[in-house]
Amino acid sequence: MNDSNSIYLKFFLTTMLSVLLFSSVLSQDQIKPHIANYEINVRGIKGNLDTILNTKDNIYIAKNELNASGIAGIFLRGNVKESSTFSILNSEFLPVSFSSIDNMSKEKKSITINFEKNKNVISSIFNGDKKILPYDQNTFDRLSLKYALMLDLSNQNILPQYKVFEGEDIKLINVEILESKTLNVPYGEFKVIGIKNHESGSSKRSILWCAEELDYLPIAIEQYRNEKLWMQAKLSYHEFK
């Protein structure tokens, strides 16, 4: 098992859409705290993605942890931990901070991002390299983006394009809604609506299959490269807190 395999596992967390990342929508400007765990398969390499969302003093705190499982867990030591904080006030979605620590790769990686609205800047540190950009309220980190997508879906207000900042460059994410269908996952059978998204100019794309029955929580996540499925996550456990 070489280091490229750990990259595939990590990419599943970091792009999803991660992932990432996921929300249960109560109303226009509220999200239910919850636990949602997923079984993932990356070209035969298996792992677990555990997610939790809490809220305190009008601030939401989302955390994800990715670990390899089965035989892959013997070779892929460490994990990837990510967290995001954001607020939703008067229907205004505001990312506050993001952090990611990757102890799974051969070369360790760390990212911190602060969305400083009062200073009108977005600051980041990526593996020790600092960057400062002008503040843009429509720019998300890769975890808060997923919550924003779910919230917009619940309000039937999905935009055709979103911006995400991952510590180096701002990426444009194109989004479209797919027709509903029924899916079976370890947690059960659900009617779902798809959100397909991809970065402008990239051959990679992701689909979040969101269940209205669970307040638009993604119960399945698929990622494709050159139209070939190479990563998949399926909901194995869910609990509203």
Image (spheres, helix red, strand yellow):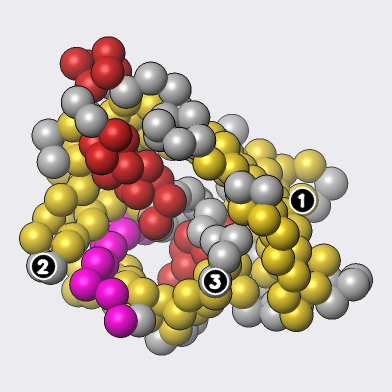
Within the image, what quadrant is residue 129 found in? bottom right
What distance separates the C-alpha of mark 3 from that of mark 1? Answer: 26 Å
Residue drawn at x 9%, y 60% is: 228
Within the image, what quadrant is residue 184 found in? top left
What distance separates the C-alpha of mark 2 from that of mark 3? Answer: 25 Å
Quick check: can you spot residue 188?
no
Rendered location of residue 163, percent (x, y): 53, 76
Amino acid tagged 3: Asp
Of marks 2 and 3, the one in the foreground? 3
- Pointer 2: residues within 10 angstroms few (<14), some, or many (20+)? few
Please give the label number shown on residue 227: 2
Whether residue 206 appears in magenta in the rendering, the answer is: yes
Q: Are marks 2 and 3 in contact (CB under 8 Å)?
A: no
Residue drawn at x 23%, y 22% is: 72
Q: Which secondary structure lies at badge 2?
A: loop
The stretch of residues the image draws in magenta is: 201-212
Q: Which residue is mark 3?
A: 169
Query: Dividing the image into 4 quarters, which one contains the N terminus?
Result: top left
Quick check: can you spot residue 224?
yes
Q: Is residue 169 above or below residue 185?
A: below
Chief SS of the magenta region:
strand
Residue drawn at x 29%, y 29% is: 47
Q: Which secondary structure lies at badge 3?
A: loop
What distance separates the C-alpha of mark 1 from that of mark 2? Answer: 38 Å
> Residue placed farthest to the bottom in the image?
160
